[in-house]
């Protein structure tokens, strides 16, 4: 990336009136390449999910200590080596996948339910709008990781609390998007028509407003998922996430960094696992956005929580 | 413009109020009683009670909330039990490294991200576009604390070019400061550069489709003038916004990267450590004032009402994004 320099850019031959030179060369390639990379993301994600689901079969016991083989390099017995007390890194990474994906899914569920609810109420009822959105603004003003750490301090370390803390952090982001959609949908003719036919507020919201504001939410969900996985890893890395005895990628990294010189595999493999998972989630998110929400340019919310 | 700015600044007041309230609520939800922490494990129940009274912790919550607001308004953030000094002073101490690190990281992010986005947008879907965007995606997919660790592994441990940890203050020479900041700044900046590259690309693509670009080309302007002068200026509107947001994110979120790199920055947030702190790098108990590898990082502990610097960070954060939202509107309509 650093190899990109200005003169190179300027030396490019002038394009035609329209940008999009590739279209002339390979008209079919554009959507396919996009989709292919989304497929790669989907496959990576499926792989991580499978690894997490089959963790007991694939990995064995992540807490079994083989004290004789402390900090052993990757070998046939320990595919990814062992950590400082002789636990198998492969097994811990696989169990970490299970934890990360579970936490991510739970955070998405929590943030979506709470965010959609707040967004619907704030967007639809003018009287609630200010109150709800100011609280959301207040929560958004905290940097994601700081708020998550503060909430963890309040709640105490446990997997459930990690979910709650990260869920609270990402709720306002969902609520904002939903509210923005609702503000537009509220004024549409079909909502007015439904109201004229005597639909109650509840039916109106559930039947007509909610389904029509879902596609940006679905797109956002994949990015929240990625951010949640990242935040969980960051919290555990800082030692305020899931308890130390739970194998999580952040925990492995946090313990492994002490031995980074003697045993780099302790950092490299869980790190690669985090990176690939988040890459996969971002790829799928990009694909979803192209498919569902072509006009969205809301990249700002991509990864704000990424610390 | 002036009234617009004033309005945006006024809109900060309710946000600041909410932030202060959220901080207050969090502090009071936290387990642990500051009075018994200060008094120590051997204090009698009476002593603890007296201390609670002295600190005003036995007052009803609404009264405490009002006092919290009043103190914040006067700029009094109280004393930190862990650092044994006024919180404001502790924050001020960290301003230099934090601002320098954040600025350097932002500078790197812009220097990499904006040109990459422009080159990408010049020829969408070309091979260089796809390569750059893949890098951008990798950039936003790598956790900055991981990148920090890997950078240390390569450049500090193996090559020995940079110090593994620590911050060299400006007064000891700017070059040393730069050396001590470069690795963490790269770790933080690369992540944000991916974001900036993506935004710049999509903004440039939008602008390059505008009729005035066609007009510029039609009247025979050099491609360089069209892209760098006419298109870039307009494409910078969303980009500037995202740079502002990213500066704010870096300011607040740099803790993780900094912790990963053992960097003494705004460690204020470390007050927020959980009840059972397990500081990486130190599995055992940590003496209060140990210096060296860990700088003067305070030990973790329960959240303590009245002594936490909360509020300072989030408000400045909000102000930043407000400030960068500022230029948007006046420049927006073309």
Image (cartoon, rainbow, N blue to C red):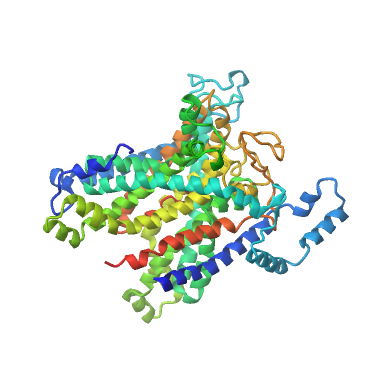
- What residue is drawn where x is 53% and y is 25%? A261
On screen, residue B287 versus residue A150, left or right, reads: right
- Camera-side residue: B247 or B283? B247
Residue A249, placed above or below residue B159? below
Residue B321, placed above or below residue B184? below
On screen, residue A139 versus residue A275, left or right, reads: right
- What residue is drawn where x is 25% and y is 40%? B128
The image quadrant of residue B287 is top right
The image quadrant of residue A64 is top right
Tell me if residue B106 can be seen. yes
- Camera-side residue: B190 or A139? B190
Residue B276 placement (x, y as % from top left): 68, 43
On screen, residue A156 versus residue B134, left or right, reads: right
Q: Quadrant of the N terminus of chain B?
A: bottom left
Residue A277 placement (x, y as % from top left): 43, 40
- What residue is drawn where x is 71% and y is 54%? B79
Residue B84 placement (x, y as % from top left): 72, 48
Q: Quadrant of the C terminus of chain B?
A: bottom left
- What residue is drawn where x is 46% and y is 37%? B147
Count of marks overlaid on the render:
0
Tell me if residue B169 can be seen. no
Residue B124 placement (x, y as % from top left): 23, 47
């Amino acid at each position: 990336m650093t190899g990109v320099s200005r003169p190179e850019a300027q030396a490019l031959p002038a394009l035609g009136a329209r940008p999009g030179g590739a279209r002339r060369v390979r008209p079919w390639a554009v959507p396919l390449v996009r989709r292919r990379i989304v497929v790669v993301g989907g496959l990576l994600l499926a792989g991580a999910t499978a690894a997490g689901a089959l963790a007991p079969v694939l990995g064995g016991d992540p807490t079994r200590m083989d004290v004789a083989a402390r900090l052993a390099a990757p070998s046939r017995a320990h595919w990814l080596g062992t950590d400082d007390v002789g636990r198998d890194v492969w097994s811990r990474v696989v169990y970490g996948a299970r934890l990360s994906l579970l936490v991510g899914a739970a955070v998405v569920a929590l943030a979506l339910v709470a965010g959609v609810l707040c967004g619907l109420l704030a967007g639809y009822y003018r009287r609630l709008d200010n109150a709800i959105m100011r609280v959301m603004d207040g929560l958004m003003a905290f940097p994601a990781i700081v708020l998550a750490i503060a909430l963890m301090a309040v709640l105490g370390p446990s997997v459930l609390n990690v979910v709650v803390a990260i869920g609270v952090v990402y709720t306002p982001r969902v609520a904002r998007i939903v509210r923005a959609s609702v503000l537009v949908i509220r004024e549409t003719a079909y909502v007015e028509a439904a109201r004229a036919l005597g639909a109650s507020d509840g039916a109106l919201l559930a039947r007509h407003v909610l389904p029509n504001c879902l596609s940006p939410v679905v797109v956002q969900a994949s990015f929240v998922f990625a951010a949640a996985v990242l935040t969980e890893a960051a919290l555990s890395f800082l030692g305020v996430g899931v308890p130390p005895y739970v194998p999580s990628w952040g925990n492995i990294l946090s313990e492994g960094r002490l031995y980074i010189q003697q045993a780099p595999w302790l950092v490299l493999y869980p790190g690669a696992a985090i990176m690939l998972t988040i890459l996969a989630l971002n790829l799928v998110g990009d694909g979803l956005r192209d498919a569902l929400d072509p006009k969205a340019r809301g990249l700002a919310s991509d990864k704000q929580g990424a610390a | 413009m002036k009234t617009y700015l004033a309005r945006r600044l006024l809109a900060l007041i309710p946000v600041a109020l909410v932030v202060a309230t959220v901080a207050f609520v969090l502090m009071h939800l936290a387990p642990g009683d500051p009075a018994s922490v200060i008094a120590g494990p051997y204090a009698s129940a009476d002593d603890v009670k007296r201390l609670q009274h002295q600190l005003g912790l036995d007052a009803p919550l609404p009264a405490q909330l009002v006092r919290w607001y009043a103190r914040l308004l006067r700029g009094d953030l109280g004393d930190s039990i862990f650092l044994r000094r006024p919180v404001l002073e502790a924050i001020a101490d960290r301003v230099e490294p934090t601002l320098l690190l954040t600025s350097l990281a932002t500078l790197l992010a812009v220097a990499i991200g904006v040109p990459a986005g422009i080159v990408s947008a010049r020829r969408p879907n070309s091979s260089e576009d796809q390569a750059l965007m893949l890098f951008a995606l990798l950039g936003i997919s790598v956790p900055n604390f991981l990148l920090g660790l890997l950078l240390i592994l390569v450049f500090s441990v193996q090559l020995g070019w940079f110090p593994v940890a620590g911050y060299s203050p400006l007064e000891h020479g700017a070059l040393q400061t730069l050396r001590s900041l470069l690795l963490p700044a790269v770790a933080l900046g690369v992540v944000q550069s991916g974001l900036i590259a993506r935004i710049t690309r999509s903004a440039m693509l939008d602008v390059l489709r505008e009729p005035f670009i066609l007009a510029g080309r039609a009247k025979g302007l050099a491609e360089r003038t069209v892209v760098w002068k006419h298109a870039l200026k307009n494409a910078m509107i969303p980009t500037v916004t995202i740079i502002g947001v990213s500066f704010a994110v870096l300011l607040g979120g740099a803790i993780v990267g900094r912790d990963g790199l053992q960097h003494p920055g705004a460690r204020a947030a470390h007050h927020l450590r959980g009840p059972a702190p397990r500081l990486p790098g130190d599995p055992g108990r940590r003496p209060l004032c140990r210096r060296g590898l860990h700088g003067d990082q305070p030990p973790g502990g329960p959240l303590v009402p009245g002594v936490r610097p909360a509020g300072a960070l989030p408000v400045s954060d909000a102000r930043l994004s407000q400030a960068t939202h500022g230029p948007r509107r006046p420049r927006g309509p073309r």
